[in-house]
Image: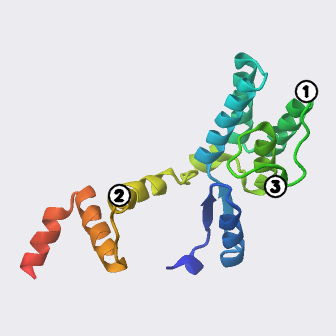
Amino acid sequence: MGVKKETELIVLADGARWISQLAKTQYPQARLILDWWHLKKRVGETVDWLIHHGLGRKDATNWGRQLRDWLWRGKAVAALQSCRSLGQQLGLSPPADKSQTKLGQTSLQSFYLYLRNNLDSIVDYQTYRRKGYFISSVWVEKTIDLLICRRLKLRGQNWSRQGAENIVTFRQLILNDHWKSYWQHQKAS
């Protein structure tokens, strides 16, 4: 796919371990970046958790804003220290490892662990964005939703690989407004 020829390769990940492990083994020269949208979403979920677990709305919101600002500028260590400090103020201890939090669990401790596990892939998003890099996989995820999920994952459907590929091709033509030109080209052939 031409990946080996590129001078710079960036892999966007949502924080899932398997993605970072795959990137490290298959593309060790790549720069792994934690997806900004997922990171920002996790901050918001943690702020909501804090509001429901004793921190006032104003304090939790201000903490979340400060954290997003630090993370946007790549100051992951400051964000991690802020989580640790807030946890101590609330009488929480940071989890030592992932076994202390459940998958999908929202809490200050699980957010702390998420940051700690992805520390090396949190970058200065502001600089990357200014240079024209994608800092989020939201475009890819939306494309998958439009092309595949909304058509192929409907109730009661069962697809062969060939049938699914055909439907995805047709949906791509329709969504990209190439349907008529495709068929005109087919008639000309």
Q: Are marks 1 and 3 in contact (CB under 8 Å)?
A: no
Taking the spot 62% from the left edge, 52% from the top edge, the residue there is: 35
In the displayed structure, does residue 154 sit left or right of residue 186? right
Secondary structure, mark 3, is helix
Which percent across, then down, holds residue 137? 53, 54
Q: CA distance from mark 2 to mark 3?
A: 35 Å
Around disc 1, counting alpha carbons within 10 Å, would you say few (fewer than 14), some (14 to 19), or many (20 or more)?
few
- Label 3 Cα crowd, 10 Å radius (few <14 / some 14-19 / many 20+): few
First-in-chain label (1 vs 2)? 1
The residue that appears at 66% across and 75% down in the rendered structure is 27
- Give the amino acid type for the residue marked by disc 3 in the picture: Lys
Q: Tag 2: Cα neighbours inside 10 Å, few (<14), some, or many (≥20)?
A: few
- Which label belongs to residue 98? 3
Mark 2 or mark 3: name the one nearer the start of the chain: 3
- Closest to the observer, 87 or 174: 87
Residue bearing mark 1: 89
Q: CA distance from mark 1 to mark 3?
A: 22 Å
Residue, far bottom? 189
Quadrant occupied by the C terminus = bottom left
Q: Which mark is residue 78?
A: none
- Image coordinates of residue 184 in percent, x first then y, are 10, 70
Nearer the camera: disc 1 or disc 2 = 2
In this rendering, the label closer to the viewer, 2 or 3: 2
For discs 1 and 3, the disc positioned in front in the rendered view: 3
Q: Earlier in the sequence, mark 1 or mark 3?
A: 1
Whole-Å distance between the Cαs marked 1 and 2? 48 Å
* Marker disc for residue 155: 2
